[in-house]
Image (tube, rainbow, N blue to C red):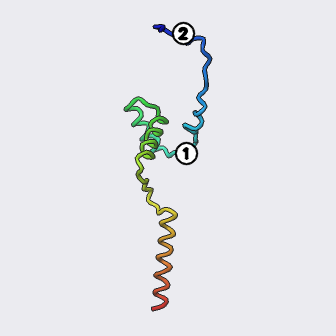
Amino acid sequence: MRKECDFSKMKPVPNPFFEKLSKEVTFRLDFDSLAYFQKVGDAYGFPVEKVMQLYLQKLASSGGRLNIGFPTLEERKDIDAYIERQIEREAKA
């Protein structure tokens, strides 16, 4: 068995799964949020994009639910149905 291999003459082979591993997105971010991620990135020596990527990956993989302060579409349907039932009960009374 060889102790060393010369890889200098090998042709690079693109990863066929790369496109499925990640996707480039563009979105707007307020200055305060950007400053927060920049501060965190500076502490670890990471660029702000990497910090946001790591944060979103951790959030997505945790299985937790992000509470943004608004009811989901399903919750809104339940609320509307509840209100309708209350209106019907009051109309019958």
Find disc 1 in the rendering and name its residue: 28
Which residue occupies the extreme left position in the image?
A: 43
Element type at mark 2: loop
Q: Is residue 64 above or below residue 71?
A: above
Residue at (43% x, 53% y) in the render: 66
Q: Is residue 61 above or below residue 67?
A: above
Residue type, label 2? Asp
Which residue occupies the extreme bottom position in the image?
A: 93
- Residue 91, horizontal then vertical, whole percent: 49, 89
- Residue 32, horizontal then vertical, whole percent: 45, 45
- Label 2, label 1: how far apart the Cα atoms are: 46 Å
Residue at (55% x, 45% y) in the render: 28
Q: Which mark is residue 6?
A: 2
- Residue 60, horizontal then vertical, whole percent: 45, 46
Mark with earlier residue (2, 1): 2
Residue at (41% x, 29% y) in the render: 45
Element type at mark 1: loop
Q: Which mark is residue 70?
A: none
